[in-house]
Amino acid sequence: MRKINVKIWYAALVMALTMGLQSCGSGEKKQADATSKDGRSTASIDGEKKNSKNSALGDAISEEAMLHVASLLDNYLALKNALVAGDAEKAKSSAQTTLTSLEKFDISSLTGKLKKVYGSQLDMIKTHNTKISKATDVVAQREELDMLSMHMLVLVKTFKANQIPLYKQHCPMAFDSKGAGWLSEKRKIRNPYFGEKMLKCGSIKDSIMAN
């Protein structure tokens, strides 16, 4: 399992978009957590929003593609929250749901740069979710989250998939102080690598505005 630092997160993101995108503190702020208008802290796209929009690359995104990537983000956030809670079964279920969604999506519906970026992330997203779905404990599952988060970040920013703000957060203590990151729908730090042991360890490194 490769470990990456924050700089590599940015480098990978910039490279993907061009193809086509520390001490331990709570990092908490007083601003209320962002939620959708019905109170859900999810990234789901409202069924009423039927019109296509342009990606970060300038290409038009179909409704099908928007819904697909938004569902991947929802599943990712559910998986991350399961790891915060130390619930291996829920993490496994979320990973399996992602794998099913990936299998059902017709990549031929994408064209040009969007197809290239999606394809460049697909194999690794499958790989990390497969490992999580087969793992029997949260320790093994947590080892996959850092890299999975990087690939999800590329898709989310490219497809503008988040309907609420997202926060890129980082724990400097994870994996013997090598550090690891994750995406969250909440500003409040809830550490998926340590759970209750070090729940508030981490800080916000970046934010992604709602689309």
Image (cartoon, grey):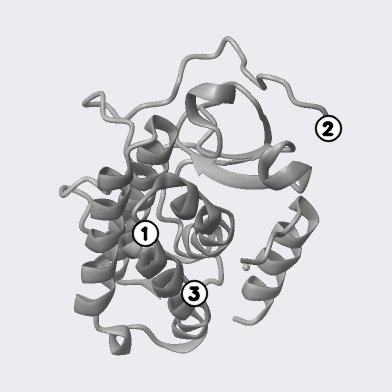
Left or right: residue 5 compared with residue 211: right
Mark 3 residue type: Met
Task: Give neighbour class at mark 3: few <14, some 14-19, many 20+ (Cα, 10 Å).
Answer: some
Confirm whether residue 85 shows in the render. Answer: yes
Residue position marked by numbered label 2 in the rendering: 22
Residue position marked by numbered label 1 in the rendering: 135
Badge 3 element: helix
Estimate the x, y position of residue 79 in percent, counting from the top left.
36, 47
Please tell me the numbered disc located at residue 124: 3
Left or right: residue 12 compared with residue 149: right
Please tell me the numbered disc located at residue 33: none
Instruction: Of the two numbered discs 1 and 3 on the same chain, state the one appearing first in sequence.
Output: 3
Mark 1 residue type: Ala
Count of number-bearing discs: 3
Badge 2 element: loop
Badge 1 element: loop
User: Split into 4 quadrants, where in the image is the N terminus?
Assistant: bottom right
Left or right: residue 210 compared with residue 107: right
Cα distance between the residues tagged 1 and 2: 31 Å
Instruction: Of the two numbered discs 1 and 2 on the same chain, state the one appearing first in sequence.
Output: 2
**Residue at horizontal 74%, vertical 38%?**
172
Q: Where 125 sits versus 165, above or below?
A: below
Q: Where 114 sits versus 7, above or below?
A: below
Q: Nearer the viewer, residue 204 or 68?
A: 204
For discs 1 and 3, the disc positioned in front in the rendered view: 1
Mark 2 residue type: Gln
Left or right: residue 127 compared with residue 12: left
**Residue at horizontal 45%, vertical 21%?**
33
